[in-house]
Each structure stands twice: as structure tokens, then as C-alpha cells.
Image (tube, rainbow, N blue to C red):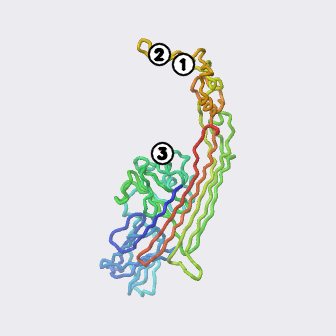
């Protein structure tokens, strides 16, 4: 069972430098039609989902800056007496993306406005790191058997190679997820961030993997990322969890894989073992919006929540070959036990140990059979736990039994995130992730 609780506070103030961690940024220069700088222009960056506002004023050179911006879609509004109000919508600020938007105001009354549409997509030119990013819609729609946001990004970004067992990509598979080599770095050498908080343990594994419904965006940063990222010899998975908005949103999903749709594996076919009843189910839901307590508190434009849940139930089949003792060997009779070359696999009597010409030697049992009175009752009992061979072995230690256990796996994960605007310049968020699993050991022999 795993627990993780963390609180992240973000102070949004003006600065000439961009913020770090999961946040992005926006800056630019405001000029008049002749290209002269406009000082003291009022600039607002408005979150279109929550209506949260960041405010700034241009300096003497007409420059404005929003250095610490949470990933979201924004409107940029600029006002100054003697000029028409300028408004540009649908500015998508993603994790660790920093844009420059220069604005030329038109002469006119401030009550008039100019709305900018149809602009070319913004190009991020500030941070030189290579890698890639996926938003919530892409994470939901791209093929992803294990519903693991880190693994789906690792399969779509360039210069990334997952080297772990491809079966283990679920949200419980910290080891499998951490076996990714980024930009030539070693596996188990990457850093994982949730809302700017490292969730990488001392063995360089991620201690928790958020569900798809809980993730707003995940960005992979490789090569020339900022030095403040640290704790990595390969790359950084920079993840931002979903937040609520003024509108109520939710989702319900479910996946089911029927064993009738799958083929039997090689080992079972060879041993004439039927296809296992290997069912797989994955289901969950999410819900979020403003926190509203009737007649007590209305959190629109100020306090929001997002909750998500995901669970899977899996019957996981395994197959493997083993060498088990024959019925004769269980009684101490090794008269028919031969080596790979066809020679008798000789069993020596330990009670005949002696030294001859400086060499320690022993005598074999008569007929290569251990007398029944020499057999340990404990040994007999232990041998009884071995299953009977399922096929004839040609020589000693050749595999003669195919194990085919069916393991019952299950996992549950819950995520809660709350956002609150304390003041116009100070916002806080709190996230709680609870994860539990049941992953029993694989038993090759019947119990």
C-alpha cells in the first residue's frame, strides 16, 4: 500500500525571470502603431476555465511578464487610455513552455476593443530542452493498455526506449515504469515530478503513477533542460495534475478484455494445457468543479476541486518449465536416472566417505538405489510437495513439468486535488493520492 500527500504553493508575482518546475510563462512588449513603447499599460492574463486573473503593468520599455503561470488556456487583455482594448483568447500555456507575445495597440477609446483570432500557433523558443508533451485529450485517446501516462509518452517521444517487461505498465508497476532510458541515459536514472514535487525514491523509481483521469499534462524533458531539474541522469517526466474549473465536468470509463479473444501461449500449447481464464477489467471515474456549499460558501472563481478514481482487476497467467523428481526418484530409486550422455547418474553413499591416496572418495549405493531405511522422513514429506511430471524426461535435470498458475492481481487508486485563490497574487493547491494493490507472489507448484 502506498500513500502520498503533498501541498504546493505558488506565488504569482511579476519578475524579469521565468519560473521553474511545472509552470510556464508569458511575456512581451506593448507598443503603439508607430512602434513606440507604451508604459503603464494594464495587462491581465485570465484563466478561461476558472476566471483566475494574473495582473501586471508594463515598464518604461513597454514590457510585461508573467513568470509563473499554471498550465491552462488563457486570455490576454491589455488596456491603456487612448487605445482600444486588446484581447487575445485561447493562449494555451503548457508545462515548462514560455511564450513571447508582442502587442501593438490601436488608437481609439478604451471602451472599444480589438479581439485577435486566427493567429498562428505560438512557438516556444525560450527553453531548449528536447522531448515532448501530451495533454489530457491525447492521454485519453492514444492507445495505452496499462493506462500509464509515463509509458504512453515514452512510446511517442523521440530518443526514448522503454527497456522493462512490456507486461508491467499499469499504475502499480513502479519498477517497470522506471526502466526507461532517455537520450542515452541509463534506466532507473530519471526524475518524476507531480506539480513540481519530486516523487522519485532513493532507488530512482517513481513511488506513484497517477491515473490518466487525474493528469492534465505530462511533459518529458531531455538533454538541455534547466539545471534546477536535477536528480536525473537521463530525463524528467514533468506532470501537472488536473484542476477543477467554474464548469462541472466528469467522466466514467471501463475496459474489459475477454479471455476468449486471446490466444494460448507456447508453453501451454506444448504441454496440452488449455487456455487460461485470463480476464482483465479496468474502470474508473472523475469529477470536478467549483466547491459550493449551499447557503455557506460559493467557490466560483476562487476554490475548485478535482477527484478521480481508477481500479483494475486482472487474472494474470504465467507458464514455465521445471524439473521435478520422478515417481521412482521420490522413493530413492535412481536406477533409471541418466545423464545427458546416457550414463547412469550415480548416487554415492555419504556414510562411505574415506580418503584413498590423499583423495576423498565415496562408494555408490548398490543398484543406484537408496535403501528405504536411509531415507529421511522430512525429505519424503518435502518431495511430496512436488507435482507429478507431466511428460517424460530424457535425462536427469531435463524439464518435465509445465507450471501454469493463474494469479489474481488488483489495484485501486484515488486522487483529490483542491485549488484556492488566497489573494490575487497568491494561490495554493493541495493534492492527495492514495494507492493500494494486491500483487501476490507467483507459485509455480500447486498448493
Residue 307: image x %, image y %? 56, 66
Labels 1 and 3: the sequence-earlier one: 3
Q: Dot 3: within a 10 Å radius of its alpha carbon, few (fewer than 14), some, or many (20 or more) residues?
A: few
Front residue of this view, candidates 74 and 436: 436
Q: Is residue 144 visible?
A: no
Front residue of this view, candidates 76 and 435: 435
> Toward which corner of the image does residue 33 lie, by quadrant?
bottom left
How many marks are shown on the rendered structure? 3
- From this viewpoint, which residue is outermost toward the top? 357
For the N terminus, the image quarter is bottom right
Residue under numbered circle 3: 163
Q: What's the residue at 51%, 70% (across, down)?
A: 418
Camera-near label (1 vs 3) is 1
- From this viewpoint, which residue is outermost toward the left? 60
Alpha-carbon span between mark 1 and mark 3: 49 Å
For the C terminus, the image quarter is top right
Q: Dot 1: within a 10 Å radius of its alpha carbon, few (fewer than 14), some, or many (20 or more) residues?
A: some
> Toward which corner of the image does residue 336 lie, by quadrant?
top right
Q: What's the residue at 48%, 48% (across, down)?
A: 162
Residue under numbered circle 1: 349
Residue under numbered circle 2: 354
340, above or below 205, in the image: above
Q: What's the residue at 45%, 77% (across, down)?
A: 422
Amino acid at each position: 500500500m502506498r500513500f502520498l500527500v503533498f501541498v504546493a504553493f505558488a506565488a504569482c508575482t511579476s519578475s524579469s525571470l521565468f519560473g521553474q518546475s511545472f509552470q510556464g510563462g508569458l511575456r512581451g512588449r506593448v507598443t503603439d502603431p508607430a512602434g513606440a513603447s507604451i508604459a503603464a499599460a494594464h495587462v491581465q492574463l485570465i484563466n478561461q476555465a476558472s476566471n483566475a486573473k494574473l495582473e501586471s503593468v508594463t515598464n518604461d520599455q513597454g514590457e510585461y511578464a508573467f513568470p509563473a503561470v499554471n498550465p491552462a488556456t488563457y486570455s490576454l487583455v491589455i488596456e491603456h487610455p487612448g487605445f482600444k482594448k486588446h484581447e487575445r483568447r485561447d493562449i494555451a500555456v503548457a508545462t515548462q513552455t514560455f511564450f513571447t507575445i508582442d502587442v501593438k495597440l490601436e488608437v481609439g477609446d478604451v471602451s472599444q476593443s480589438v479581439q485577435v483570432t486566427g493567429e498562428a500557433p505560438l512557438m516556444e523558443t525560450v527553453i531548449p530542452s528536447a522531448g515532448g508533451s501530451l495533454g489530457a485529450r491525447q492521454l485519453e485517446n492514444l492507445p495505452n493498455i496499462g493506462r500509464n501516462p509515463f509509458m504512453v509518452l515514452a512510446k511517442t517521444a523521440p530518443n526514448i526506449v522503454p527497456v522493462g517487461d512490456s507486461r508491467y505498465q499499469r499504475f502499480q508497476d513502479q519498477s517497470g515504469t522506471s526502466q526507461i532510458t532517455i537520450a542515452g541515459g541509463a534506466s532507473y536514472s530519471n526524475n518524476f515530478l507531480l506539480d513540481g514535487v519530486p516523487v522519485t525514491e532513493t532507488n530512482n523509481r517513481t513511488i506513484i503513477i497517477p491515473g490518466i483521469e487525474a493528469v492534465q499534462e505530462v511533459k518529458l524533458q531531455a538533454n538541455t533542460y534547466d539545471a534546477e531539474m536535477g536528480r536525473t541522469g537521463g530525463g524528467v517526466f514533468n506532470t501537472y495534475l488536473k484542476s477543477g474549473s467554474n464548469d462541472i465536468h466528469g467522466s466514467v470509463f471501463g475496459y474489459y478484455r475477454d479471455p476468449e479473444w486471446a490466444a494460448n501461449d507456447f508453453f501451454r500449447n506444448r504441454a496440452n494445457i488449455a487456455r487460461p481464464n485470463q480476464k482483465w477489467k479496468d474502470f474508473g471515474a472523475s469529477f470536478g468543479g467549483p466547491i459550493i456549499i449551499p447557503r455557506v460558501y460559493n467557490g466560483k472563481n476562487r476554490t475548485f476541486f478535482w477527484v478521480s478514481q481508477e481500479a483494475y482487476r486482472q487474472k494474470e497467467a504465467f507458464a514455465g518449465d521445471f524439473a521435478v523428481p520422478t515417481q521412482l526418484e521420490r522413493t530413492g530409486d535412481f536406477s533409471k536416472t541418466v545423464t545427458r550422455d546416457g550414463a547412469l547418474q550415480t548416487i554415492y553413499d555419504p556414510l562411505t566417505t574415506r580418503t584413498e591416496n590423499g583423495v576423498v572418495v565415496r562408494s555408490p549405493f548398490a543398484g543406484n538405489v537408496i535403501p528405504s531405511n536411509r531415507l529421511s522422513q522430512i525429505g519424503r514429506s518435502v518431495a511430496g510437495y512436488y507435482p507429478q511430471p507431466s511428460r517424460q524426461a530424457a535425462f536427469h535435470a531435463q524439464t518435465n513439468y509445465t507450471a501454469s498458475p493463474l494469479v489474481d492481481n488488483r489495484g485501486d487508486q484515488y486522487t483529490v486535488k483542491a485549488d484556492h485563490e488566497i489573494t490575487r497574487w497568491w494561490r495554493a493547491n493541495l493534492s492527495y493520492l492514495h494507492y493500494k494493490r494486491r500483487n501476490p507472489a507467483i507459485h509455480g507448484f500447486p498448493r
